[in-house]
Image (cartoon, rainbow, N blue to C red):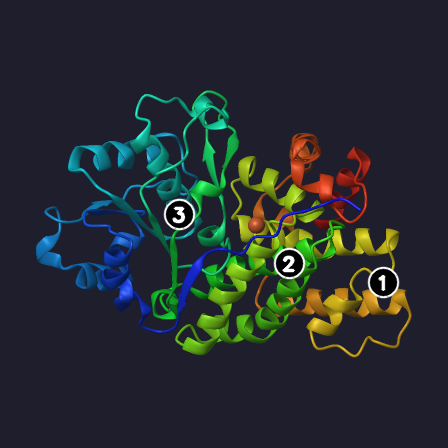
Amino acid sequence: MGTTAFSFPTRTLYGAGTLNELPANLQRLHVRRPIVVTDAGFARTDAFASLVKVLGAERLSRDWFVFAEVNPNPVEDDVRRPAALMRHHGCDGVIAIGGGSPLDAGKAARLLAKHPGASFQHFYSEALDWTGLAPLVAIPTTAGTGSEVGRSSVITLDATKRKAVIFHPELLAKLVILDPELTVGLPAKLTAATGADALTHCIESYTCPAFHPMCDGIALEGVRLIVEALPRAVRDGKDIEARGHMLVAAAMGAVAFQKDLGVVHSMAHPLSTICGMHHGLANALCLVAGMKFCAARKPGLYRRVGIACGLEVQRVTDAEADARTIAFVAQFLAGIGLDTRLGALGVTAAQLDALVLQAVEDPCHATNAVPVTREDFRSLYLEVI
Ligand SMILES: [Fe+2]
């Protein structure tokens, strides 16, 4: 039997209005001059106005600072510029707030603030001193990526124009604030797409074959929460309980996928890099095809996912349990408006070769429930195009 390491370390504040506890917690973390890292879109929201109020508008640019220009898919400059500001103003902490992109940029900026001369290639070197990074407070305003509890940061490198993953336990946030009031302004379409990302994290991490019963339990409860809360959050953005449950479920999905992901994420990643598709939407449109593919090769794989969805599939055959679960997921996604085909979103057969090539190279499917070949990817894409 192999050995393994389980870690669930992030302190998390949960509940409507928990943003108000930020100043006391900054003090607890000995952060006196934080920088807020976010994107331009978020800086125009009511949620950002709440943050300004909590930190003190009159103290802006004196005791706390803002970098609000992170790109949707962060590039090196989105890390370099806040890091330079941190050094210029003597900032001793980072508040990363927004979707997955500002959270990833904010995480990595601390490393560059400590090592201003380092190139991004250095980030993969064991020799780099990762200790003593400025503390990070992560505040998600979408419920999907779960980047707030992750120990990685995805940055598109200048030289290769490809996404690279910086991974280190020291990247973890010291504190996560899950305040559903910050997500009420998220439009229904984005609520659905980001929620589908969280659902895919839970289903793919639960079904990947690594031994990790703690993650498995978290993934299944994440499925149950999403099935109950996501349609409500899509229907009524001001449903605070549903918004809260989605925030927790998204964090649970990301905690669970430290176990790993699978074929659906390998299909989704190229749809973002080649076709510019939203990550959550890409997962949603590939999820059912991916589940059918895995179930055909490993019958019974989705029985417990079905039970988490509230289905009566305890006493039916493996094939029946999978079929009912997959039909439920298809109907669920359609119910929140995520049943489009790739073709309707501009993906063409001419892009197929490039998509297949990148999907094969993507690392996620290495941990899929069953092996996936180049030909498999081709027929999977054809099924959803
Ligand atoms: Fe994802």
Q: Earlier in the sequence, mark 2 or mark 1?
A: 2
Q: On the image, which quarter does residue 275 sit in?
A: top right
- For label 3, the residue is 103
Give the crowd class for mark 2: few <14, some 14-19, many >=20 residues within 10 Å.
many
Q: Distance between the residues labelled 3 and 2?
A: 22 Å
Q: Position of residue 150 (x, y in %)?
A: 50, 49
Instruction: Using the rendered image of the protein, determine whether residue 349 is visible from the camera's viewpoint.
Output: yes
Q: Where is residue 108 in the image (x, y as percent from the top left)?
A: 39, 37
Up the image or down, 24 lies above or below 156; here it is below
Instruction: Indicate left or right for 79 with 310 as reference.
Output: left
- For label 2, the residue is 215
Q: Which residue is drawn at 64% across and 46% down?
A: 265
Q: How far apart are marks 2 and 1 (CA)?
A: 19 Å
Pick the front one: 340 or 295: 295
Q: Which amino acid does label 2 sit on?
A: Cys
Q: Which residue is drawn at 61% across and 56% down?
A: 256
Give the crowd class for mark 1: few <14, some 14-19, many >=20 residues within 10 Å.
some
- For label 1, the residue is 300
Task: Report the residue that reaches farthest toward the right.
Answer: 317
Q: Is mark 2 on a helix, strand or loop?
A: helix
Number of numbered discs: 3
Q: What element carries label 3?
A: helix
Q: Where is residue 164 in the image (x, y as percent from the top left)?
A: 52, 32
Up the image or down, 224 lies above or below 5; here it is below
Q: Is mark 1 on a helix, strand or loop?
A: loop
Q: Mark 2 or 1, which is nearer the eye?
A: 2
